[in-house]
Image (cartoon, rainbow, N blue to C red):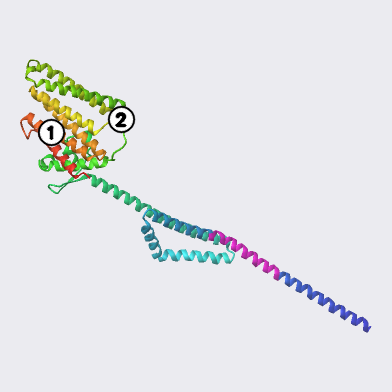
Amino acid sequence: MRDMAEQNKNQSFAGKAQQNEKIEETVQKEKRGRKDQRKKRKQKSLRWMIPIAIGVGLDILCAVCLYVWSKSIGKSSVYLNFVADGMANVVLIGMESALTIATAVLSSKGEKKLACFLGVSSTVIILIIFGLAGVKVWGSVNEDSESQTAAGMEESRKAFSPAGDQVVYQVQQYILEDDLFIEKLEQYCSMTDREISREERPDIMAELILRYLKSKAVGITEKVLPKNYETNVLLADVLYESFSDLLDESRKPENGSIMDRICDYALKILSDAIDCRIEADHSLHTAENRRMIGVYQIDSGDFFLRVEEIDSATACFEDAAEWAVQSIYSAAVENDLEGMNDAWDVLNNATLKMEEAEGSDDGDRVQKMKNIRDAYRIVIDQWN
């Protein structure tokens, strides 16, 4: 009996020990389970932090890119001013900070969806802010562009008269080819014809011309002379030489009886030479060819003066002045100061001839040519 009691006692102790081991094992499993759950929650929390990290990185990248762009176009001050304004906005920064902190806290507590929503909202808000910075920079660029355009338009509208130190506003763009003698001066300026004195007129005209020629000047360029140009120039030279010979013959006393016929032939040959030069000009504009047309026209006008055909003579002198102006233009395009001066000599000669033909120094056509001559003298003297 005693042995059986001891045996039962030992079995009871063994059962309790085994039960304790099972309990301990269960406790360990529960601990390991809770530890695994915490680890999984932590891993999930870290995964939900990835979008937040990406958003922060995107914000930083956007900020850096905007700064680099604004600096490259010379507008970094605008961007930095915007950033400074944003930093000064305590409410905005506090709200953004609160969103970030709340996102982190909610993420650590496993509130994944809400944390993600707040993180995305924070990212979107920052992107909107930097987007506004970009709009501000771009708006400043457009403002500068509009200011420069307005300044350019204002500059093109202004011409300064050296004589009277008077500001004249150009209300219509002057185009040299459309108005060689600037007879519509009042249309280009805000002043009426009565408000522009005769003395001021050449100065104002010179400013319009100089501004126009400077916009067209490109410098000397290589030219390939078209065959038609060379042929007509050579033929014109031959005809002009024949004209010169006939002119000499017409002055000889022994040819007095046939002088009229010699003059007719000479004038016809000179007209053909002018036509050849004009045909060459259709192929290629050159300052020298245009100058020679002016020379030929003056010779033609002299011929008409000899036979007292005044109207024909004045028409030739006016044509000579027009070709001289076009020659100055062609020389100015190539920045050829010598060519400009040579053409001006023809313009001056034509003006003096017109004054001689009309027998007046203040007739309308004479004054028109004198004004343009004086204006181009100012232009050439200021050319550099």
SS for tag 1? Answer: helix
Displayed quadrant of residue 230:
top left
Dot 2: few (<14), some (14–19), or many (≥20) neighbours within 10 Å? few
> Is 28 situated left or right of 245 in this image?
right
Toward the bottom, the furthest residue is: 2
Residue bearing mark 1: 349
Q: Which mark is residue 225?
A: 2
> Is residue 89 covered in magenta?
no
Amino acid on which the number 2 mark rests in the picture: Leu
| Cβ–Cβ under 8 Å for marks 1 and 2 | no
Displayed quadrant of residue 260:
top left
Inter-mark Cα distance, 1 to 2? 29 Å
Considering only vertical position in the picture, is 314 above or below 79? above
- In the rendering, at what x and y percent does residue 136 appear? 37, 55
> Is 101 situated left or right of 75 in this image?
right
Residue at the spot 49% in from the left edge and 58% down from the top edge: 123
- In the rendering, at what x and y percent does residue 60 appear? 47, 59
Residue at the spot 22% in from the left edge and 25% down from the top edge: 237
Instruction: Give the magenta part as a residue range.
Output: 31-53
Q: How many marks?
A: 2
Displayed quadrant of residue 329:
top left
Considering only vertical position in the picture, is 383 above or below 319? below
- In the rendering, at what x and y percent does residue 70 appear? 39, 55
> Is residue 45 covered in magenta?
yes
